[in-house]
Image (cartoon, helix red, strand yellow):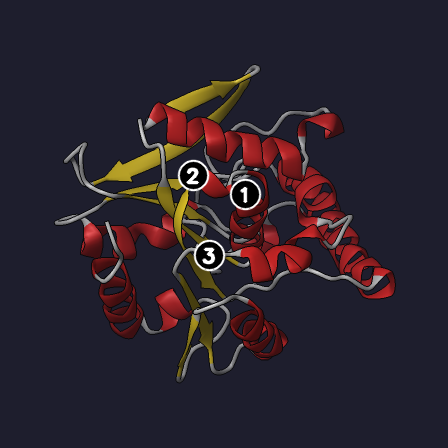
Amino acid sequence: MPYIDRAGVAIHYDVTGTAKDAPLVLCTHGYSLTGAMWQADAAALADGYRVAAWDIRGHGYSASPDDPAAYSKALALGDMNALLDELGAPRAVLMGHSLGGYLSLSFHVEHPERVRALVLVGTGPGYRNPEARAGWNAQAEERARQFEQHGLAGLEGAPGHGGRHTSARGLALAARGILAQHDGLVMEDLPNIRVPTLIVVGADDKPFIGASEYMEKRIPGSRRVVLPDAGHMPNVDQPARFQAELRAFLDGLPD
């Protein structure tokens, strides 16, 4: 299995599609999921794209350090930057689900020159209001406590992680260090996004319908697709429709 070393922290990734000169799509999963959530989508794109799906630190086959300081948004963004370097891609399409979408937007704040386009799936731009952000962070802390108290048992039968998780402690530390939010920079950056942006949300994903509408209004030229009969993972609930929308978007990107 391929890894990159990030100061002693092994970050796992998979690449589908063998043509090194093909456009790269870097896929970032949601919290408590893994890169396995993108397997069907990667296979559907393999004839024309390289698709790299990775496991966020604390998740899946990536390392789960014991030190809480090894988990932060800044370190996760550094992992993404290092993956692009490893894959020889000056720029890439960033596709992210939930937490992965937020990280993709955060990456655009830090490295807009490396972002060719954005695909935002079941995600939102965070919070400007400190009280709303505190509510989100309380939920992140509760998820951390659940993993500490019950281990990985709560993930049994849940889609999207592919049975890869090895450390409940890693997931707990990732909730506190990466899932928790500390500023409104992503929301403030939305009007500055100048790359093509596709926003996909499930019609039944009520917590993120409003966020998807907000992003569509704030990101210039963005396009939003609401998939019927789909929840928080529309690529899993409606794979054919999702892949059709994704392929049309990617094939229409300027060189």
Disc number for residue 114: 2
Question: Which three-letter amino acid code belongs to the residue tagged 3?
Answer: Arg
Location of residue 13 by image quarter: top left
52, above or below 229, in the image? above
Tag 2, which secondary structure?
Answer: helix
Residue at 32% across, 32% down: 89
Question: Which three-letter amino acid code belongs to the residue tagged 2?
Answer: Arg
Left of 199 or right of it: where is 130? right
Of the two numbered discs 2 and 1 on the same chain, state the one appearing first in sequence: 1
> In this rendering, does residue 159 appear at all?
no
Tag 1, which secondary structure?
Answer: helix
User: Are dots 3 and 2 in contact, CB under 8 Å?
Assistant: no
Residue at 60% across, 64% down: 124
Left of 168 or right of it: where is 148? right
Q: Nearer the viewer, residue 52 or 163?
A: 52
Mark 2 Cα shell of 10 Å, populated few (<14), some (14-19), many (≥20): some
Question: Which three-letter amino acid code belongs to the residue tagged 1?
Answer: Phe
149, above or below 71, in the image? below
Mark 1 Cα shell of 10 Å, populated few (<14), some (14-19), many (≥20): many
Q: Position of residue 97 (x, y in %)?
A: 48, 57
Disc number for residue 194: 3
Mark 3 Cα shell of 10 Å, populated few (<14), some (14-19), many (≥20): some
Q: CA distance from mark 3 to mark 2?
A: 12 Å
